[in-house]
Amino acid sequence: DKLNESDPPITYKRNLAASFTDMCFYSIFKDIKATHLFVYRVAPHEVMTQAAHEQVMEQLNQLTVRLGSMWGGSRLVHVWTKRRECTTVVVLCGDKAIDEFAAWMRVTTFSDMHSPTGSYTCNLAIFTMEPRVAGKRSAAQRFPRTTMLVRAKVDAMREE
């Protein structure tokens, strides 16, 4: 689960990725809006409880420290940026040829380098390219498959 020679760490545009593959995924998911594809942002509180939200961020922070490459069957992508933040992307779907759409969760951890405790703050975002169900109000109704993937990930996390 650690760094390996066949997929070494890489620095690109002052961003450091845990591997070349991670930088490729990060670049795709970071810049996907520039391609004018339909990418929707789903508010975490619409598909999970606040407690689950906090658990997801904490668990992903722990995996980032260990440089885990997988989490419950989902690929993890780790990139440290020049702004002293670490972005960890959980690829929920879209990294396999059989996937019909892409969906991912992104946790960004901001380090407070000036804090004596080395504290940090986190931001969780969920994105999907799932076709939107028209006429529905809640995110769970508009993006049912993405909601199912997120909730399955949260449930699996609780069982670990």
Image: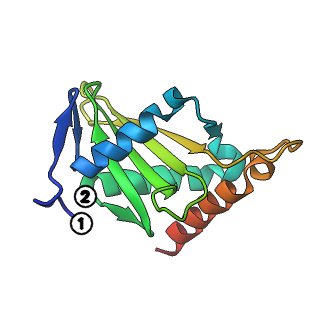
Q: Which mark is residue 1?
A: 1
Q: Which amino acid lies under the numbered mark 1 shown in the image of this protein?
A: Asp
Which residue is at the far right?
A: 135
Q: Considering the numbered disc 2 on the image, is that residue within a helix, a strand or a loop?
A: helix
Q: Amino acid at mark 2?
A: Arg
In this image, 56 relative to 18: left or right? right
Are dots 1 and 2 in contact, CB under 8 Å? Answer: yes
Image side of residue 46 versus residue 136, left or right: left
Frontmost residue, 14 versus 102:
102
Tell me if I can see residue 108 in this picture.
no
Identify the mark nearer the N-term, 1 or 2.
1
The local crowd at label 2, few if under 14, some if 14 to 19, many if 20 or more residues have their Cα within 10 Å, is: few
Is 74 rendered above or below residue 14?
Answer: below
Point out residue 73 in the picture as x, y percentages from the top left corner.
Answer: 44, 69
| Residue that appears at 42% across and 48% down | 89
Residue ranking furthest to the left = 5
Residue 18, how many percent across, how many down? 22, 49
Asked whether, in this view, residue 149 is left or right of residue 67, the answer is: right
The answer to whether residue 160 is seen in the rendering is: yes
Residue at point 65%, 41% (across, down): 42
Location of the N terminus by quadrant is bottom left
Q: Which mark is residue 149?
A: none
Residue matched to label 2: 66
